[in-house]
Amino acid sequence: MSSVSPAESSSVDSAGIHPVVAGAAPGLYRVLADGPGETGGVLAGREVPSDETLLRLYRAMALVRAVDERMITLQRQGRISFYGAATGQEAAVIGSGLALEATDWVVPALREGGIALLRGLSLSDYVNQLFGNGSDIEKGRQMPCHYGHRDVRYVTLSSCIANQLFHAVGISLAARLRGDDTIAVGYMGDGATSEGDFHVAMEFAARLRAPVLLFCQNNQWAISTGVRGQTLAATMAQKAHGYGMDGYRVDGNDVLAVHALTSHVVAEIRRTGRPAFVEALTYRVGAHSTSDDPSRYRDESITERWKERDPLRRLRPLLEARGLWDDARDAAFISDVAERLKAEVQRAEADAPPSIDSLFDDVYAAVPPHLVAQREALRGSTAHLKASSH
Amino acid sequence: MNDVTEGPKATRTLNMVQAIGAALMQAMEGDDRVVVLGEDVGKFGGVFRATLGLYERFGESRVIDTPLSEAGIIGTAIGMALYGLRPVAEIQFADFVYPGFDQIVSELAKYRYRSGGHFTCPVLVRMPYGGGIRGGLYHSQSPEAYFAHTAGLVVAIPSNPHDAKGMLLAALKHDDPVILLEPKRIYRASRGEVPDAPYEVPLGKAAVVRPGRDLTIVAYGAMVSVALDAAATLESEHGRSAEVIDVRTLVPLDLETLAASVNRTGRAVVVHEAPRTCGYGAELVASLQETCFWRLEAPLERVTGLDTPFPHTLEHYYLPDTPRVVSAALRALTA
Ligand SMILES: Cc1ncc(C[n+]2csc(CCOP(=O)(O)OP(=O)(O)O)c2C)c(N)n1
Ligand SMILES: [Mg+2]
């Protein structure tokens, strides 16, 4: 390895005093045309994946859409306590998720639950987590949308913004140390790029040459704060440059673009063993979560414009033109998902809550004496709560 | 409206968030050094609406929507305070303070000491804290002990709208950094008469919120109303008279008020929702033991959260409630 010190690598600048010019801001990669009347058109020179892949992408996005809609309703009815939807962002979620191998690891933020489903998390496990019932593999400990399952290599979410990015770096380094051809993807929102952890994770990924993809779903909002409230950089992708990492930018509402670009970048990471950063430009068309009303802090006419770029609407004409999808198939798909969801919700809601004893499990590998004592005390002092437990 | 009185002693009925908002409004009106910064505090008025209307009234230079970084919020507030401003830093949930924890414990708490008093940073850090809102692990925690353990920080927790306004205004006159932990579970549930005019509830003073003879219940934050309910039950169902003390300021602690009560009753129950091990209750019990040992009639009792992370579905098992406080009180009374 040749290492050149900064002093050696510097040639004298004869032009005088001026700021360093970074590489040109990367353009937005796009496959599906995006203009009035252009839905379904494919840009010249872009490849279209196989029919099978097209269908997988579409169905997976439609599933996310349907699940999110149902769950938002359940939350409004007070049947689950919270929900953070990916509405409008399905292309960024599914397009990137489908570009990964089953052996790769996903380290998610709030809006990647669709990737857990895509990787094989069962709808039952998904719904149980939302209800935090006795069958929930997390034992009812976390708020809804904090999925995780080792079998599908989808790491359990914490609510803390940006913390997880290091874990993706570490996982990818460990995989390489073990000789595995496994990469990790750390997801984040645009807001997360303001946390110190984001910047240090970028530094570590680049400096330690981690085979990691750091993937930013720039939905242009962090609760009420627009992306210009986070950064004055023209793009998120160009931040990568400052860390000596490749940054890419993709139309996050174009699932073919996200899928193609992520597949390319992931292959590069495997080939070179170096990290990369992807910014998927999209828009949070809904509320941040079920606890806010966006019309209080933003111009919803802009949201309407983004709704016209809806990722499902943009892909569907292509599928129809190829005879892969039509209204009848759509209706059948929607009603099938609705029925499965209805059954899962009914079952999950009727399920017993986690046991009181389970509160004390998993704090440590074994329950230590002080927690044994607290467990005994709680068993004796909560008879009055049994009736009110849900 | 019948809940508004007129004249110099005018009051109105407010909930705790409204009282905090009113205090911030008055503080900013009365002192142009007061600035507010945090995530979503501007146009949106904060996720709990505590800063509602400030942005419209004072503009973006004094009501600052920051990028999403707690280290940035606290660290920048420290710089502003060093220069002479009176920053109010909002941390959206106490659970998310940790990226800014280094700035609090290494910088905010230590500037005065390390500079021999040359540099001080009277920042007010406000954070909603505590459980009972179905927030799970990361929207429920009670981190007061971390701050109480750090020399140089004043740590205060109001339990009602009146104190929230008065303590906030007192904090903005105080020369030291103040960590104001706001029990979000009762942000709206706790309503009461709040004077319109500015006033201060002094930091470092506990309040006897219900006088009693047989036993002392010590609590703060959302646990004060649990303690009051327990006292009512003890009276109505067991014929025992419990005194309830609201600690209000954890550091510096008003041990005098606490000890006066416990020396009289000889029995005490300490209640908090934070975990038990090294929780603030341990400090309370140790201090009361040192001060009141010869007058104690029974072991001092603690009713606390569990030494586990904060759960979601079973949070009502985690949180101390009235029956648990009553049982502890009966144990102390019959020992
Ligand atoms: C460390 C931390 N600070 C604050 C919060 C509160 N919070 C939850 S989501 C959110 C905005 C996140 O925005 P972004 O990263 O863009 O993700 P998005 O919600 O848009 O997917 C904030 C501030 C948090 N969860 N963690
Ligand atoms: Mg965002």
Image: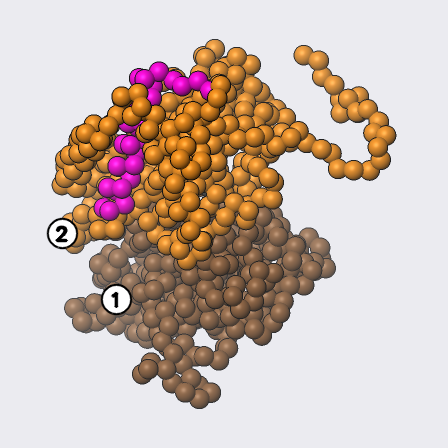
Q: Amino acid at mark 1?
A: Asp
Instruction: Please identify the quadrant where the N terminus of chain A is shown.
Output: top right
Residue sitting farthest toward the front:
A37
Q: Is residue A97 magenta?
A: no
Residue that label 2 marks: A387
User: Where does the image place residue B97, in percent across and percent down from the top left?
Assistant: 49, 48
Residue that label 1 marks: B229
Chain letter for the residue marked with disc 2 in the picture:
A
Secondary structure of the residue carrying tag 2 is loop
Q: Are marks 1 and 2 in contact (CB under 8 Å)?
A: no
Hue of chain B? brown
Q: Amino acid at mark 2?
A: Ala
Q: Is residue A108 above or below residue B296?
A: above
Q: Nearer the viewer, residue B331 or B132?
A: B132
Distance between the alpha carbons at the discs numbered 1 and 2 = 20 Å
B129 relative to A368 in the view: left or right: right
Q: Is residue B36 above or below residue A358?
A: below
Hue of chain A? orange
Chain letter for the residue marked with disc 1 in the picture:
B
Give the residue drawn at x 58%, y 44%.
A231
Give the residue drawn at x 47%, y 63%.
B51
Is ligand 1 closer than 8 angstroms to the Cβ of mark 2? no
Q: Is residue A243 above or below residue B1?
A: above
User: Where does the image place residue B256, in percent across and percent down from the top left?
Assistant: 46, 70
Count of marks placed on residues: 2
User: Residue A160, labelled with which disc?
Assistant: none
Q: Which residues are magenta?
A: A46-74
A336 relative to B248 in the view: left or right: left
Displayed quadrant of residue B300: bottom left
Q: Nearer the viewer, residue A115 or B310?
A: A115
User: Where does the image place residue B159, in percent across and percent down from the top left?
Assistant: 38, 66
